[in-house]
Image: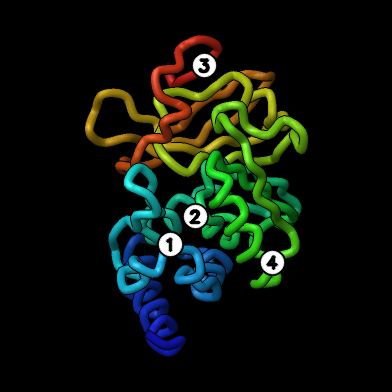
Amino acid sequence: MNNNFFEIARTNMINNQILPNGVKNSEIINSFDNTQKELFVPDSEKDLVYSDSDIMITPERYLMRSFVLAKMFEYCNFSKEDSVLVIGCLTGYSVAIVSKLVSYVFGIENNKKFVDQANKTLSQMGCLNCSVLFKSNLNSGNNKNSPYDKIFIEGSVQSIPSALSKQLKENGEIYTVLKDDDYIGEFVRGKKIDSIISFTKLFNTNLFELEDFINQKNGYENDS
């Protein structure tokens, strides 16, 4: 497969997946259009890279469908002044997308191989306002570079650790898919006001769970 194949496939992804799902922000659309997703997936998955399917990175971890990611980002209200934390960023595709929309984006990942791969790819692409850090436990976030204007959790979780709310600026926002025992989760926005996070449900979707967030009950917040 040559570059022309991927360029055509990327254009088709924009026209047939992202736009029909209500994404209207031109900066988000352009960021997806100008980011080579094929650089972030294993060779075995490259023929599916711009399909409307989740892309397997490991048997337990997947890159979510691009049109779902784009729809989520449409709600995130990114600005050029934002400092953003992306949790569970895998090989860095979401970090590359967000880097074109904000001041600086930190990604964290609990797989050292993915961290190395992400930073290498992002550097080769000339993405200078981002970095990916190794964290053995994703639910602790990245306190060193906090506070953040926005936190995006790339995967579904059962609840939000209080440690993450402390890493948000006042009036900052956290985005994730909350999912308990129901089959379908809810993509939500949590806004921090007076140190309390208030959640708004945005749309229903289903994502793979991040194991670091499963069955953690103490010191967590949810939308109840």
User: Which residue carries the number 2 mark?
Assistant: 74
Of circles 3 and 1, which is in front?
3
Residue 113 x, y percent position in the rendering: 55, 51
Q: From the viewer's perspective, is residue 207 above or below residue 34?
A: above
The residue depicted at 32 percent of the width and 35 percent of the height is: 185
Residue 207, quarter of picture: top left
If you read the primary sequence from the N terminus, does the residue marked by circle 2 or circle 4 appear first? 2
Report the Cα–Cα distance between label 3 and label 2: 26 Å
The residue depicted at 55 percent of the width and 28 percent of the height is: 139
User: Which residue carries the number 4 mark?
Assistant: 123
Q: Amino acid at mark 3?
A: Tyr
If you read the primary sequence from the N terminus, does the residue marked by circle 3 or circle 1 appear first? 1
Q: From the viewer's perspective, is residue 203 above or below residue 28?
A: above
The colour scheme of the drawn protein is: rainbow
Res 98 seen here: no
If you read the primary sequence from the N terminus, does the residue marked by circle 3 or circle 2 appear first? 2
Res 21 seen here: yes
Mark 1, Cα crowd under 10 Å, few <14 / some 14-19 / many 20+, is many
Report the Cα–Cα distance between label 4 and label 1: 28 Å
Element marked by disc 4: helix
- Marks 2 and 4 in Cβ contact (< 8 Å): no
Residue 10 located left or right of residue 130 = left
Q: Which mark is residue 23?
A: 1
Element marked by disc 2: helix
